[in-house]
Image: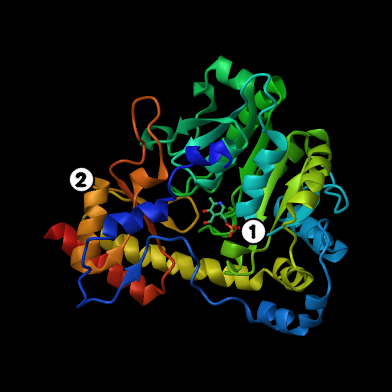
Amino acid sequence: MNPRLALLHDYPFQRLARLFADSEPNRDKSPIAWSIGEPKHASPQIVRDAIRDNLDELSTYPSTKGLAELRRAIANWLTQRFQLTAETIDPERHILPVNGTREALFSIAQTVAADDSSKQPVVIMPNPFYQIYEGAALLAGAEPYYLNTTADTGYRMDFSDIPEDILKRTRLVYVCSPGNPAGAIMGHEQYHQLLELAEKYDFVIASDECYSEIYFNEDKPPVGLLQVANDLGIKEYQRCLVFHSLSKRSNLPGLRSGFVAGDGELMKAYMQYRTYHGATLSNMAQRASIVAWEDEDHVRENRELYRKKFDAVLEILSQVMQVNKPDAAFYLWAHVNINDKEFARGLYENENVAVLPGSYLSRESGGINPGTGHVRMALVAPLDECVDAAKRIRDFIER
Ligand SMILES: Cc1ncc(COP(=O)(O)O)c(C=O)c1O
């Protein structure tokens, strides 16, 4: 057995299943799952049609590099969305399709942060965080460094807080903007600060931007890492990698389609790694993905659905709990006045609504667990179900 497997923590949903194992939900009420961030809006008809039209592709092996047409569609999307006018994105060198960002966020650590026995590499990540970052670091033989994000930091990473001896060993920094769970967006200045550190200490930035298309103000889409690198004139997007997905943007979590883009040298090494790792994206899925990246109408409609849900739910929940509208993404990260696990279990038993205890998404670091006392609520269910869940939570708190 690989001894590093023993270092892995249980996944948050395994812990939730254990928490609920000896509980009885209130069967008089229909179950509502606000625990898992699985988009529930309808997948776009144009994408479904494209899958049907490309069934013949099932008889071909896809290549690791992916179809040139898909990489071109992605380059166009990136260029327009992030105004990449100075530093051209080259579909040949800067882009690879991936089987959803989850596997890519994992495999990038194996490519750039694996222990080479000289000094233990460090992988920095936000805390709370998407647990793949940690598992990827541990299986690469790296040491995770958890950078707390709290109300005091606006739920953003404060890079000036990282000790120098950690920075010297750092190979990879994961950032997540818009963030899961708090929905905070990193600004231009924060990316700039991180880019300066990346140059000084020679590490790679993996920017998880899978929620970048779920935002509230149509005139103010979240900024991205490549955009800032482009604005700063960083040649070849050195040390920068971004991770994008169709799962949230286009309600296609089952398609398993995303991409990684950035630094040409890193992408060359990553391509070699992926050749052996073997996580290719079927040509059928790639052809459907082209259609999805080339259409913005369905993405705007998707945002409108989330906007309505946030407005309706916050009107109810803000009466009884400390909860703010996030900058973006589709979660509420709320304070609860009792232990977060007790809150989640009580809510499940009384109201049949599942939410995720915040402490399951974070580790103790610097003497605190920044997820404690929070719950994460994913507003993925349809509007009326979300309103129903909010009312049940209000009643539960009031009781
Ligand atoms: C922060 C974050 N990154 C990445 C992913 C993975 O998404 P996918 O593999 O569907 O692209 C998720 C999914 O929930 C997520 O929350």
Q: Quick check: is the Cβ at mark 1 less than 8 Å away from ligand 1?
A: yes
Circle 1 sits on which residue? 100
Horizontally, residue 251 falls left or right of residue 225, namely: left
Q: Quick check: is the Cβ at mark 2 less than 8 Å away from ligand 1?
A: no
The crowd level at tag 2 (other Cα within 10 Å; few <14, some 14-19, many 20+) is: few
In the foreground, 301 or 6: 6
Image quarter of the C terminus: bottom left
Element carrying mark 1? loop
Question: Quarter-wise, where is residue 353 in the image?
Answer: bottom left
What residue do we see at 64% from left, 19% from top? 119
Q: Are marks 2 and 1 in contact (CB under 8 Å)?
A: no
Label 1 amino acid? Gly
Cα–Cα gap, marks 2 and 1: 36 Å
Element carrying mark 2? loop
In the foreground, 205 or 133: 133
Tell me: residue 281, above or below residue 127.
below
Label 2 amino acid? Asn
Question: Quarter-wise, where is residue 391 in the image?
Answer: bottom left
Mark found first going from the N terminus, 2 or 1: 1
Q: Where is residue 362 shown, x and y percent of the image?
A: 41, 40
What residue do we see at 31% from left, 41% from top? 372
What kind of colouring is applied to the model shown? rainbow
Circle 2 sits on which residue? 337
